[in-house]
Amino acid sequence: MKYCHATIITMLTLSAASYAQETPLGSNVQGLLRYAMNSSPEYAGMRSEADAAMERIVSAGALPDPRLRTEWRDITRGGEQNPTLLPGRVGSTRYLLMQDLPWSGKRDLKREAAESQADAARGRAASTWSDLVARIKTAYAQLYYLEQNKRLNQEILDLMVQLEKVAQVRYAGGLTAQQDVIRAQLEQTAMRNELIALDTERQQLRSRLNALLGRSSPEPLATPAHIPALPPPERLSVSHLEQRARDKNPLLRTETSQIKAAEKGRDLAYRNRYPDFTLGVSPIQYSGAIREWELMLEINIPLQQDSRRAQERESEAMLSAARSRREAVANQILADLSENVAGLDAAKRSLTLIADSLLPQSELTFRSALAGYESGKVDFATLLDAQKQIRQAKLSQVKTGLSAQMRLADIERILGEDL
């Protein structure tokens, strides 16, 4: 069995190493998320805080450390000797071992409150991870669509080069003015300037993505290869997603845990009306032998009623505040969810409209304008307008696709899981 287990681990390790070699970091969002889970200092810090909160559970429910007291009596033996602390030479030595004992149920309440705080810490860690995932997915989508935008600009630049050649042919034949050639060259210069701006933006996005991954800014990232597909309409039911958000959202889980912790704190405040005890046992040594035993019981008297009533009112107020915070968080989460679902639906319908209508119409208009310009039926300005219509349609497709991916990332952040 041990050999089989070791073999499986070795196979998985080799498979992961092979996958890492075949898939460069940055080519897909799954690889980025795997890397971030192990390397993000932000997420690592929250996980450490959650681990620390888990360790506090044991100490919260533990008894206080016992105390040992030693008393040396008659250290001069009635003035017959110099002062000494040797137990066998003093009049008597009293040893007192004491243990504090809280009132029944107090330790359980403290432990349960610590467990709720640990759940809240785990919820905060999960919320941090959900936020980090959303930011990584958003940055990846921005980088992907920036690459698409760059490719589009390069295609348009190549097209403008072809249009310049057409204009030069017509100018050489005396069919058009030199202004057409100059306008084509101006358009090319503007496109090259946009390509420079896109390169700058790409570097900025890569630096941002590296920061989210816990890497230094200059480290290389592969070009994004593909973007996740948008979910089908049947998975975007608002009522179904709202229920998933109520059950899975990390912030709501955190606030629920905070309510439980506040309830335990309130119960503990009321339990403090009852006294705590201290038990002790005391052997007394004379010369070299233990000759007497004593028992001790100590009770604290809860007389400061004003202080305790104030603590009880404080605990009730803290519980009320925790409940109000959870309600406010739930309202905001559901509002954000509804907004993002509506935005994603609108983006999907826009993408369909662009792909089915706007792009084909723009391409048809351009081909018609190009044929008309070559035959002298339309001027160069009309041809440029047709070319700009294609460019605007494709840019709209890129921007709408990016908007849809950002909406999807926000929905998954709210749900705390992938759709």
Image: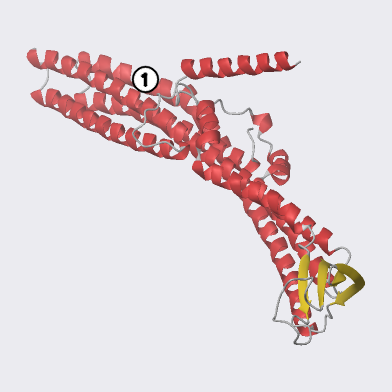
Q: The N terminus is located in which quarter? A: top right
Mark yes or no: residue 72 visible.
yes
Q: Sort mark 1 into few (<14), some (14-19) or many (20+) by Cα contacts within 10 Å.
A: some
Left or right side of 59 for 160: left
Question: Would you place residue 61 above or below residue 144 in this image?
Answer: below
Q: Where is residue 80 drawn, in percent x and y?
A: 76, 85
Question: What residue is at 71 percent from the left and 57 percent from the top?
Answer: 258
**Which of 287 and 140 lies nearest the eye of the viewer?**
287
Secondary element under disc 1, as helix, strand or loop, is helix
Mark yes or no: residue 404 visible.
no
Q: Residue furthest front?
A: 80
Quadrant position of residue 378: top left
Quadrant position of residue 259: bottom right
Location of mark 1 (residue): 363
**Which of 77 and 172 lies nearest the eye of the viewer?**
77
Left or right side of 107 for 133: left
The way the protein has been coloured in the rendering is secondary structure
| Amino acid on which the number 1 mark rests in the picture | Glu
Q: The C terminus is located in which quarter? A: top right
Question: What residue is at 49 percent from the left and 24 percent from the top?
Answer: 28
Question: What residue is at 56 percent from the left and 25 percent from the top?
Answer: 229
**Which of 191 and 225 lies nearest the eye of the viewer?**
225
Q: Where is residue 56 drawn, in percent x and y?
A: 70, 54
Q: Where is residue 70 drawn, in percent x and y?
A: 77, 72
Question: Would you place residue 230 above or below residue 304 in this image?
Answer: above
Q: Where is residue 303 drawn, in percent x and y?
A: 82, 84
Left or right side of 412 for 91: right
**Which of 365 and 291 lies nearest the eye of the viewer?**
291
